[in-house]
Image (tube, helix red, strand yellow):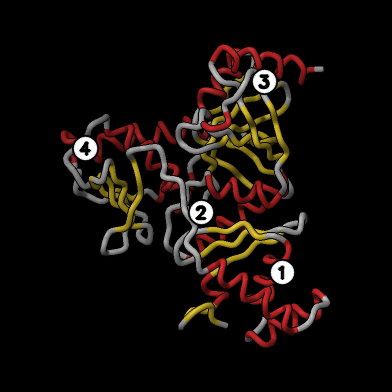
Amino acid sequence: MTNGPGIDFTDRYAIASFSDGGGVLVDLMTGGYFRLNATATLVCSALQATADMEEAIAFLARRMQVSSAEASHFVAVVREGLSQSVPRNAPMTPLLYGRSPDGSWILEENGRPIFAIADERRQVELCVSPAGLEGPLTFYLQALVPKLLALLDIPVLHAAACRIHDRYVAFSGRSGAGKTTTALTFERGGARLLSEDLLILSIADQRILIHAGGERFARDWARQVAPTVEACPGKPLDYGSLSGAPRGELVPLDAIWFVAEERRLGSELRLRPLSVSDGALALLNNGFLASSYPRQWRDFLHRSQQIAERVELMEATMPSGLDCLESAARRYIVNSAS
């Protein structure tokens, strides 16, 4: 079944449906994604599960108990929605990923290529002279690690984290959202800091686990390989060794609070539970995946679904100003102890 000339719907899209009735659809060609309501989720599932449009419409008519004309209308509305481009917020960082003509990934700083990643060969290569970098080489290597781990199929969350009494809480959000500031403020209030920007995860049975030493492992790897890269900047570096290294004690991920720069208001910390569908979409928004391969996007969507179904997800509105944030963090820690 095609969504346009020569494009098969199943090959083009991956879908995850959730217990709340909603879903998330990933465009495997562009990496764009859509939050689906219950009707759109059912329509997309039918388009994937059936052989042609007539069969999909008949399936929907039976399932939704509507006429064929109504089912056809629902399909047309969804297909029209999927044809629209979805605007994305530009990351608040000079380091961005793009594609080179040969298909490799390029880490760019203000438009200048810094590293090239050949993910099929598990190699990364410095594109410029180390002397021409604006910062230390280890800074750029540390920035690479989350992408490299994601390309090695290792779950990674762009988040800071603390242990608050007996619970491990992650603070996730886009660059500039205040993840690190929030975690460090909770640490001053009595929590134990686990990470400032990066969590390496494992998925076991019904639990999502954090490698407690994951962020330190990433920094250590960058420091260890920096001399090799600096000595031979044009020589490809094999990053496959990242996949098998120990990353410390495993602890449970109990909750993720999604923070945002535009949600720094007032003097109180406010938490709003997210539905499973909205939580999965938030996880996609804050992931590190950089790939053009459909399998990796399908895996990324599946992992986001697993995390959303097993971890408490909250939209967090943080107080405005460090003093108010610190007071609110202390109150939360005290109140959560009772």
- The CA distance from mark 1 to mark 2 is 29 Å
Residue 283 in view (yes/no): yes
- Considering depth in this image, is 267 or 97 the residue closer to the camera? 267
Residue at 65%, 25% in the rendered image: 163
Say what amino acid the circle numbered 1 marks.
Leu
Query: Which residue is under mark 2?
Result: 153
Q: Which of marks 1 and 2 is in front?
A: 1
Query: Which residue is under mark 1?
Result: 42
Marks 3 and 1, the one that precedes in the sequence: 1
Say what amino acid the circle numbered 4 marks.
Glu
Secondary element type, mark 2:
loop
Residue at 44%, 36% in the rendered image: 218
- The CA distance from mark 3 to mark 1 is 39 Å
Query: Which residue is under mark 4?
Result: 230
Determine whether 185 is above or below 227 in the image: above
- Considering depth in this image, is 3 or 84 the residue closer to the camera? 84
